Amino acid sequence: MARKKLWGGRFAADEDPLFKEFNDSLPFDRELLEADVAGSLAYARALERAGVFGRKDRLAVEKGLRAVLDEALRNPQAVAESGAEDVHSYVEGALADKVGALALKLHTGRSRNDQVATDLRLHLKRREGEIAALLDGFLRVLGALAARHPHAVIPGYTHLQRAQPVLFAHYILAYGEMFLRDRDRLRDALRRIDVCPLGSGAISGTVYPVGREELARDLGFASASANSMDAVADRDFALDFLFFASALAMHLSRLAEDFILYNSSEFAFVQMDDSVSSGSSLMPQKKNPDALELLRGKAGRVYGHLVALLTVLKGLPMTYNKDLQEDKEGLFDAVRTVDQCLRMACRVFEKVSIREERMRSATALGYLNATELADYLVAKGMPFREAHGLVGKVVMRASELDVPLEELPLEEYRGFSPLFGEDLYGCLTLETVVGRRRERGGTAPGAVRQALAQFRKRIGRG
């Protein structure tokens, strides 16, 4: 059943059908239905405090709103086919079918401007809480992956060139730090979203004593907005979420890229589980890391939503403008995308197999212990820059002979410097190279054990 417009009194001509399709937002803002009903329930109580509703009227409106929500949840298609302009029009019309003129009275002192700003905050606040729980779950998955491989060693890379050996757990915890920062960003976003615009009216506030602080608390907000104009114009809270989502997507993409490389036959450090991989339509031998590739690919989608909303907002005059209707589709999609990506990432990294021997073998290639050899000379009194240059020449000689540094004969070493002695070989073992980095933040086993314990404590698992 078509719903009457909330604003038609001033207009004589019929609405152009193309304009209606262009203007209506119900196809996507019906996602706000639960938030809209929650806001209306709280506003009904505020109108009773203001003397607009009597208790009997308020109870009738509350009963009607709950019935509207229940029916909509049971039959969402009826909402989609209602012909209403937006979710607010739908709720008001459906409520009018149940309680008559009381539904129109509920809009006393309230504008769709403060209503939609409140709905969007309520909805995003709930979804951000759900995403926070998913992110905590993913952090636990990373912690468990690190803990399962306490002794595994992997080449560390700079410029995608083998640089120095590190513990695999140390490498995973590096990503853990990134995702902990993402969690901090999300918490900041949740704090800033926790402000209630309801009661601001269209732009200048309300003449009705609705008790805005009490109204805010009733809806679960920390406070009421301080300025009615800002309250209806502000979408910074949506930008906060989209920036968090973009940073999170970027970190997921970087992690995915690493594991796509490590899963390849050229590296073969890890093996993706069959359940999160797919095959080729032509080449039967292929097993493709599609889940990781989609984690990497979806980052661009989330970035696009951030840039789109920034662009919508950049030239808007005070206060509300219809452009703000464009805040929802991208935001809703970003929420769904982040939700899906975190769920998928948990599955992927719970099931991934780590090939410890292959990773360890790779650390024997590329002279990853060269820095340790330079440090050996520094301990003998040689300035580091001089030692750095000399070891570079040693590496060139070892490369010519096609041997690792630990197999280069002592006489070869003595040809470069008399400081080299038999004890140099002890400093070149993998255990020594990794084990000497004992300072906080280093890759020595003891330091990594402490870091993992701290990491688990920070994510809520002692």
Image (cartoon, rainbow, N blue to C red):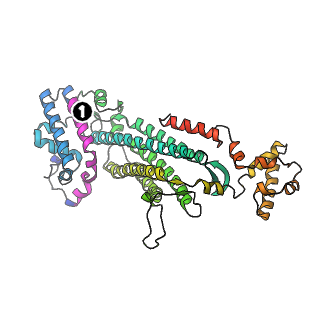
Residue 436 in the image, given as x and y percentages of width and height: 71, 42
- Relative horizontal placement of residue 15, taking residue 331 as reference (left or right): left
Q: Is 252 within the magenta?
A: no
Residue farthest toward the bottom in the current orientation of the protein: 282
Instruction: Out of 81 and 52, give the one closest to the viewer.
Output: 81
* Residue visible at 18% across and 36% down in the picture: 106
Mark 1 sits on what residue?
42
Instruction: Out of 196 and 31, give the one closest to the viewer.
Output: 31
Span colored in magenta: 18-46
* Residue visible at 69% across and 43% down in the picture: 435
Instruction: Out of 133 and 217, give the one closest to the viewer.
Output: 133
- 232 w.r.t. 421: above or below: above
The amino acid on which the numbered mark 1 sits, given as a three-letter code, is: Ala
Residue 39 in the image, given as x and y percentages of width and height: 25, 37
Q: Residues within 10 Å of mark 1 (few under 14, many from 20)?
A: some
- 50 w.r.t. 324: above or below: above
Q: Which picture quadrant has residue 401? A: bottom right
Residue 161 in the image, given as x and y percentages of width and height: 65, 58
- 426 w.r.t. 358: above or below: above
- Relative horizontal placement of residue 165, taking residue 297 as reference (left or right): right
Q: Secondary structure at mark 1?
A: helix
Total marks in image:
1
Residue 2 in the image, given as x and y percentages of width and height: 14, 52
Can residue 380 be seen? yes
- Relative horizontal placement of residue 328, taking residue 109 as reference (left or right): right
Main secondary structure of the magenta stretch: helix
* Residue visible at 47% across and 72% down in the picture: 283
Q: Is 45 within the magenta?
A: yes
Instruction: Out of 184 and 401, give the one closest to the viewer.
Output: 401
